[in-house]
Amino acid sequence: MRPSAGKDSAFTLIELLVVIAIIAVLAGMMFPVFGRIKENARMATCTNNLRQIAAALLAYENEFGQMPWLDQGTWTQVKAPNGNLVDSASGANWNEVLRNLKFLPNTPTSGVWRCPSVRQEELLAEDSNGWKANWGGYGVCSSIFRYEQSKSAVFSAALQSSKLPRPSDTWLVGDCGQPQPGSAPGSGLYRRTGSSFSRPGSLGQWVFGTNPSYQPALRHRGVAIWAAFDGRVQRMTWVDMVAERNNFTARGETF
């Protein structure tokens, strides 16, 4: 006796629902995997970018006998976009120097200068004076690099990697940004890119709250990527950052 069409349809519908459920479960399992694959690709690109920027900084030092200044020139007051008069060095900063002298392409927020995990919103966010970011997510440590001249018109000694006590452990350039105000330490949420950060006054006391300080940016699933003065690219977690592992900011060192 031939089965009724209704039973065939019901059975087919059940099978379809089972297949859909299986696909949904598999998709739920695979989406995190795809996310990790994409982030691994971004980390690989970031590593390559930093390798190139570190090589350019070392090539500059080889040619000129010193690292670029954090900012060149004397200090003067300039009018910020929000109308405030602010102190500013009159010359180019370290990444502008590399771009102007053709050590790297003059594309400050793209290409080799852009961390692929930086969101467009970070580039558009204004600082307290109304300036938008003009860099793509990589910064040096301003406690290591130096202004050419202080606000008291005193010229600085040039930074030379050969004088560093531990160049292979010292931050040359890496992921840098300002955390989102109110975000939890180590959360990896950033408001704005930065071209430099300074070490905190006390070991590991990075500032968060309503006006966070610029600092190493843990953009890659809780990891910051950075290059040391020997050109080697490495990674840093929040635990490493708090402990200032291997004294990567050169705290207390003379050079």
Image (tube, rainbow, N blue to C red):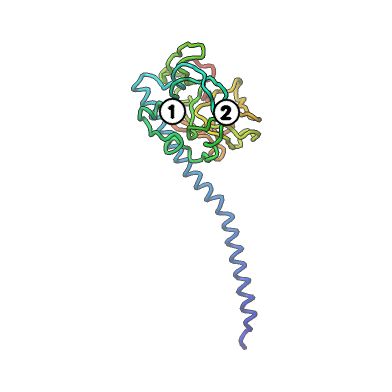
Q: Residue at x 52, y 34 (%)?
A: 224
Question: Residue 69, relative to residue 193: is it above or below?
Answer: above
- x and y percentages locating residue 85 in the rendered image: 55, 21
Residue 38, position in %: x, y? Answer: 50, 47
| Tag 2: amino acid | Asn
Q: Which residue is mark 1?
A: 95
- Decide which of 217, 252 is in the foreground and name it: 217
Snapshot quadrant of residue 2: bottom right
Q: Which residue is mark 2?
A: 82
Query: On the rendered image, what quadrant is the N terminus found in?
Result: bottom right
Residue farthest toward the front in the current orientation of the protein: 83
Instruction: In the rendered view, tell whether residue 198 sits above or below residue 2.
Output: above
Label 2: how many Cα within 10 Å (few below 14, some 14–19, many 20+): few
Question: Which residue ends up furthest to the left in the rendered image?
Answer: 63
Of 76 and 181, which appears nearest the observer? 76
Residue type of the residue flagged with mark 1: Asn
Which circle's residue, 2 or 1, is located before the other in the chain?
2
Query: Helix, strand or loop at disc 1?
Result: helix
Q: How many numbered circles does the render carry?
A: 2
- Residue 24's tag is none
**Tag 2–tag 1 contact (CB < 8 Å):** no
Position of residue 250 measured from the top left corner of the image (x, y, whole percent): 51, 21
Q: Circle 2 — which element?
A: loop
Q: Is residue 26 above or below residue 35?
A: below
Q: Quadrant of residue 148?
A: top left
Corner quadrant of residue 155: top left
Q: CA distance from mark 2 to mark 1?
A: 24 Å
Task: Look at 54% across and 23% down and name the residue there.
Answer: 198
